[in-house]
Amino acid sequence: MDTVNILTIISIAFLGSFGHCIGMCGGIVVAYSTIKIEPSSSKVSKTVAHLLYNFGRVLTYTILGAIFGYLGGVATFSNLANGSMLIFAGVVMILAGLSLMGKIKFLTLIEHSFSSSSVYKKAFRSVLNSKSNVSFFVLGMLNGLLPCGFVYFFAITAAATADPFWGAVVMFIFGISTVPAMFSLGFISSLASATSFRNMMMSLSSVAVILYGAFTIYNGYDYISNPQRTIQQCH
């Protein structure tokens, strides 16, 4: 994975976290901050709780990245297949960017109902009502499984690497890049209601997603037209 890809992923994730992530998961952060953290708790205790929650999210994303990277690797077995995979991923990224902008409903059509299952809801309620430090970490892991268009974009990016390790790296970078926004939200609940600021950040990240999708399509075309390239160069 080259520097351009890494910086692009960090930029998209960071900008999007202040737009999409706060809008999607802000309610959960505010809820656990109210239910699980005592107002009298020290700043150190609160900091540990928020960090454990965020590290739980990052772990789930990293595992998902490895899975999607593996699946992408299974689907690529020749130059044509590798290039086609990248082109397909690029097209889906552009559709995802347009969906995040609200122009189309692409992402809502592919979201599943995993979070509405009785098992998930029961586990989520149980963890939310617990006040142990471990419960914050587990809550973060469960939060990482929630249907989310932004996560889908990075999962597609992970699949495009066609490698479990690099897929995990993509999702790890994504998760870490969203920590500042979600960590800040734990202490500053007003971030969740700053609609104009979130909309601006979401617009910027959506444009970045579309541009990255176009770049990925170019990489796919270049991969097909230059047989001497290796899949590692596309990372």
Image (spheres, rainbow, N blue to C red):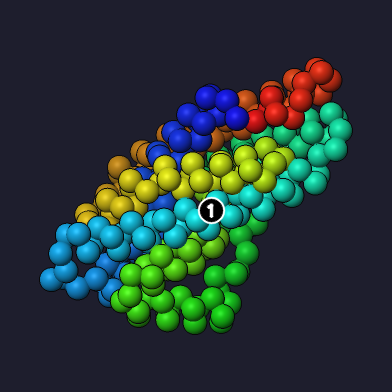
User: Can you say which quadrant of the picture contains the C terminus?
Assistant: top right
Q: Secondary structure at mark 1?
A: helix
Tell whether 143 sits left or right of 224.
left
Q: Is residue 220 above or below residue 48?
A: above
Q: Amino acid at mark 1?
A: Tyr
* Residue located at (27% from left, 51% from top): 184
Q: Is residue 69 left or right of residue 23?
A: right
> How many numbered markers are drawn?
1
Residue bearing mark 1: 61
Measuring 50% from the left and 60% from the top, which residue is drawn there?
Answer: 144
Say which quarter of the image contains residue 44.
bottom left
Where 233 falls versus 52 (above or below)?
above
Residue drawn at x 45%, y 35% is 10
Task: Look at the image and tell me whether residue 192 can be seen.
Answer: no
Residue 2 can be seen in this image: yes
Number of residues whose C-alpha sits closer than 10 Å to that of mark 1, classed few (under 14), some (14–19) or many (20 or more): many
Question: In front here: 8 or 203?
Answer: 8
Horizontal and vertical percent for residue 79?
84, 29
Camera-nearest residue between 144 and 45: 45
> Which residue is more in the foreground, 161 or 25?
161
Residue 25 lies left or right of residue 63; in this view the side is left
* Residue 100 percent location from the top left of the image: 51, 45
Instruction: Identify the image quadrant of the N terminus.
Output: top right
Residue 186 is situated, as x and y percent measured from the top left of the image, at 27, 58
| Quadrant housing residue 11 | top left
